[in-house]
Image: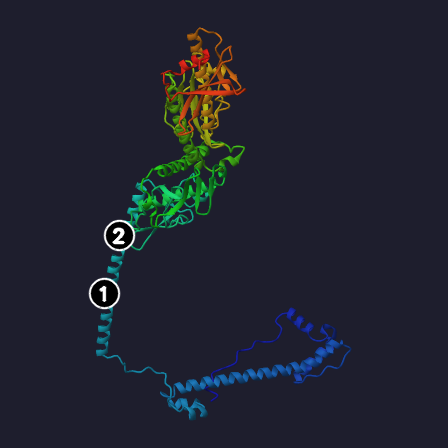
Amino acid sequence: MSSSFSLRPWPVGDKKPKTLAEFIARVNARPGGFRNLSEAKLREQIAAQENGRMEVDEPSDSDPEDEEATVDKPKDAMVAREEFLRNIDSAHQSSLLVLDMVSLLISKEKPTVAESTLSPTLREIAGIGTLGATKLKDSNITEARRQDDITVATGWRLMGINNMVDSVVLAAEKLENEIHRETKYWADVLAVSESGWNICALPHEPHTLGVRFGFAEAAPEFRNSSIAPLRRNDDGSIRLDLGRVGGGSQRIRITRKKNGVIVDQSPLPGRIPDDAPLQDRVLEARNTAYHQELWYEINREARTLLSSDVYSDASSITWKQDSETDIVFTLEDLAEPDNAKENISVVQLCCTTYYVYMQFLLFQGHRQNYHRRTTLTQLPPNRGTLQQPYAIIRAVVANTGYYRDCKIMTDFLEDLVLTLRRAGISTASCKSTYQPLVPILQQLSTRRNPKMELNFINHLVGRLESMYELNITPEARIFIRGRIAIVPFIGVLFGISLTPFSAYNASAAANPNNPNNNSGDGNANKPATEQVGGQTPFNPLEISYPPSDPGRDPYPNVSEATYYIKQATVHAVAQKLADEAAQQMGRDDIDCADTVRGFGITDRDGREAYIEITPDEVDQQMVLRLCSYSQRRIDGNVRVHRWAWRADQDDKTGRNIKQVLRMILRGQS
């Protein structure tokens, strides 16, 4: 059995020092080192090795540490010996296990050889020939099985080809559907682009297309939400992610109520269907964003117009036009049913006019922002002026007041002329004109540019003017001009002059940088004769009753303007009647003067006649009266008797105002 053991320990080399340095190191490692080394001791050690024994060194005067190392050395040797024996035993056991394994593997083919090396214990447990290491000679693969395998492989190959064909067909169908969806998507994108909308990449999603439908000059709150992604649906249609604008459609609605009853209302467009063309949906989103911004701006402005009877709450803005009429502004959702107009019998289209006008004013505000941004090289000193609300409701209130006051002025002048003609003043007449646009067009450049268009539109919006010419007598003429004022206050200013206004005054007062500034300058409102030095016939009102300076101190409302015109008419008629009476009667003591009772016609004898233009107590119609006062003694008391002749009631004898005046100056009853 020893001959069959093929495991041998690893060869161990010679332990003698190879070099002198190694020898010296070993000597120094021993207790005492070279200090205890002498020739005599070396000879003794050599002799002991030769005799096969090792003498124990006698105790010497060494250090305690060397003595302890000498004492522990036998113990280390014993431990090393035991460890060495354990390793040998472990190696021996491992070799026996390997030998049993190999013997058991060859026991089937070489049982004789395996019996000599197989341990008795393993032979009893496993037996001879339990395991084998040879290859079986007979194969389990037959020709029938090989044909079956070929058939199965061919079937799998055909199935793979069929699956590949099916996947290719599915891929082709998927690609065709994708091409169809992409074609539909890009057709819609192209239609939007051809409609004039700006197609661009989203700022935060460069791989996604978007359409910009807002306004670059809008308020910052709406400028950033004016772009919508064009996302593709599963069927290829485009879905607009409108963000802040939302999926609903909204419009501003203006309602006019009289005593709480709706009498007029602006129309609301119908909501576009969900399957409408993309360009129509983009337009609807743009209109919604525009009206949302308009609602935001008029809400900002309404907070500053409390003095103009404009009140706002969370859902509406109300302007109390007068004691009976209210104008209500609301933001309506087009998805809700519109039944508000069912009770309106007669549509006046007043609210529709406001509706269009307010949209135009917001658009004009955008153009002003663009002009200011592109022309100003530096910010103005007062940056707060750029953040002021647009004058939208202000313009609506001012324009309404302008047309109302102009109608009042027109009706007043017509009634005044009719009253004067009834009194026998055949020269009385009036006519109204409007400020021509030719002067401002002449001042603008002949070459069309954005600044010229902006100034022209500002002139149309903020420089509404009406002119009237009242001819009382051939010498007494009054020229009235009413113009709108939007900022800093809302109203209609009336300038009154005794000479014609220049046709250039409106264009000279226009300020391109502030189109709503209607203050103008002094020269722009002066009459033509004061500007160009023209000569006109002498007007007696220049001495007796001159108007205020139309350039510096115009009349702030129509009431004060009509009051002056009425008093000026009294002065002009009285002066004309006095001159004619003095000429016809051949007297030089007849004149006009201010008395306690007002402006009248007097003579040296103290006779007085007064002209009054007052409304009738019954029908409030304007009436001209020639009044005279006389003193009478009744029952011993002196009483003042007032006598009046009305121009609308002819005298029974057919006398006119001139004849009646001569009778008063002669002292006739």
For residue 544, the mark is: none
The image shows residue 363 at horizontal and vertical percentages of 40, 36
Task: Say left or right for 127 vs 306.
Answer: left
On the picture, is 255 further left or further right than 628?
left
Q: Quadrant of residue 81?
A: bottom right
* First in sequence: mark 1 vs mark 2: 1
Say which quarter of the image contains residue 467: top left
Q: Secondary structure at mark 1?
A: helix
Q: Is residue 160 visible?
A: yes
Residue 223 in sight: no
Up/down of 474 relative to 517, above or below: above
In this rendering, the answer to whether 572 lies above or below 490 is above
Give the position of the C terminus as an image quadrant: top left
**Color encoding of the figure:** rainbow
Left or right, 528 with reference to 51: left
Residue furthest to the front:
635
* Residue 330, placed above or below residue 505: below
Q: Label 2 near label 1: C-beta < 8 Å?
A: no
The residue wearing badge 1 is 162
Q: Position of residue 201 (x, y in %)?
A: 38, 46
Identity, as a three-letter code, of the amino acid under mark 1: Asn
Q: Residue at x 46, y 7 (%)?
A: 587
The residue that mark 2 highlights is 180
Q: Residue 102: percent from the left, percent from the top?
A: 42, 84
Residue type at mark 2 is His
| Furthest-top residue in this view | 586
User: Outermost residue toward the right?
Assistant: 61
